Amino acid sequence: MAEFEPVESQISADTLVVGGGIAGMTTAIETAEVGKHVILVEKLPSLGGRVAAMNQYFPKLCPPTCGMEINLKRIRLSPFVRVLTLAEVEAVSGSEGDYEVTIKLTPRYVNEKCTACGECAKVCEIERENDFNYGLDKTTAIYLPHMMAYPPRYVIDPEYVNDDRMKKCVDACEYGAIELDMQPKTITAKVSAIVWATGWKPYDATKIENLGFGKYPNVITNVIMERIASENGPTEGKIVRPSDQSEIKSIGFVQCAGSRDKNYLAYCSGICCLASMKQATYIRERYPDADIYIFYIDIRSPGRLEDFYVKMQEDEKMHFRRGKVARITESPGTQNLVLEAENTLTGEMTKTEVEIVVLATGMVPNTLDDPPPLDTPLDEFGFIVDGTGRGVVGAGSTMRPFDVSATIQDATGAALKAINVGARR
Ligand SMILES: Cc1cc2nc3c(=O)[nH]c(=O)nc-3n(C[C@H](O)[C@H](O)[C@H](O)COP(=O)(O)OP(=O)(O)OC[C@H]3O[C@@H](n4cnc5c(N)ncnc54)[C@H](O)[C@@H]3O)c2cc1C
């Protein structure tokens, strides 16, 4: 059984995996299933990473539970994986084959007796912003991070742990699972190899001022759309305008929002075209009368995913508009949005009015602001440079903006590289 909080102050394993998204989970599983011990460190209260926050994922357009559940089961049942949530690497010393890693564990304030029954949340009077839903709604101060959370255990927002009102939650828990005096812990781990799988974050859309995110309420981003569209999201799957909660009849997608532009994010994330087409597909299913406009410079749908693009072009409600969106403004009164775009081939300027706009922003590696240890080389955008034989092994979107299937392939390769380090000892 995968373990959580260790009681010991020193632990050991063959491989340490940092980041519990699909990349880190895959590396941990592949390593454990050849009989090697793994410590999987995740800084949030549960595993799953960004995939857990998707409504559906391509190519199959199934919810994240498909795929994720089986991986969680493999982790849960493995005697070789030790999961540490609310955990972060503070320091690493040593070298390949013999690392010593300092890991800081932040208290959850809820122990392993928690059954996730939710009685504590029912009586909780304190609310906090729900970061899983990008602040679109609130949770109580004691909360389950999300529907698929693993471990399936509540957590208390540390900001409220000393608030007297939390005592009500303690009294409501018949299992004695809430420990408001839990303390942070620091432990050390001895490992042979380290895999860094800390994933990505969305490009900060407020930087692209001409596109109006943060200024106009009905301009949202692609990651926010995933949450709005999710049945377990803030609107229970109703795709509504943030300004007035009305369900939509027209929507505009702005491709390359900041991407492939040296003023913002110079590279192509290779995922945003497919993410928008996926979102357009589920919007079409739910709102068959809605008109969907996709503004693009060129569409990138590699390999067999080209079929997806071809099928969409045949749909009369899908309007592919070649054009770089120069400006978005709000119509006074309606709060509709007017997209001004320039056709990149003809130079023609167009204006299109829609009710809601989705900015297809790119993926920024978390390693840009929070680099891996041991001077692991990064490229100019913050992705780990592979094959230098120094530092840690990168996996998933710390290496490149990957989709899930490419992430899984890359993470499997990372598991093998880490196992090889152990074999060379
Ligand atoms: C809008 C959008 C839609 C998408 N839709 C699809 C789709 O439909 N199909 C598809 O195949 N792909 C899709 N993708 C791509 C998909 O999200 C990625 O392939 C996937 O998230 C990569 O997983 P990962 O584990 O590398 O990173 P992440 O999912 O980011 O996971 C990284 C994990 O590391 C943790 N972490 C971060 N820093 C630390 C730290 N210092 N210490 C410990 N833990 C840390 C994070 O909390 C997180 O749990 C989409 C991307 C976007 C932008």
Image: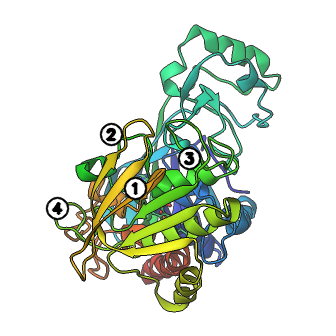
Callout in the foreground (1, 3): 1
Earlier-in-chain disc, 4 versus 2: 2
Residue 95's tag is: none
**Foreground: 129 or 370?**
129
Q: At x 79% / y 25%, what residue is drawn?
A: 119
Separation of disc 4 and disc 3 at Cα? 37 Å
Confirm whether residue 193 shows in the render. no
Pointer 3: what residue? 85
Separation of disc 3 and disc 2 at Cα? 35 Å
Mark 1 residue crowding within 10 angstroms, few (<14) / some (14–19) / many (20+):
some
Residue 215's tag is: 2
Instruction: Tell me which corner region of the image, top left, top right, bottom left or bottom right, holds residue 388.
Output: bottom left
Earlier-in-chain disc, 1 versus 2: 1
Separation of disc 1 and disc 4 at Cα? 18 Å
Amino acid type shown at disc 3: Thr
**Foreground: 283 or 135?**
283
Instruction: Give the side of residue 69 with respect to residue 364, left or right.
Output: right
Earlier-in-chain disc, 4 versus 3: 3
Earlier-in-chain disc, 1 versus 3: 3
Amino acid type shown at disc 1: Lys
- Residue 133 horizontal/vertical position (percent): 55, 43
Separation of disc 4 and disc 2 at Cα? 20 Å
Q: Are marks 3 and 2 in contact (CB under 8 Å)?
A: no
Amino acid type shown at disc 2: Lys
Farthest residue in the left direction?
263
**Foreground: 327 or 223?**
327
Amino acid type shown at disc 4: Asn
Residue 201's tag is: 1
278 shown above or below 7 = below
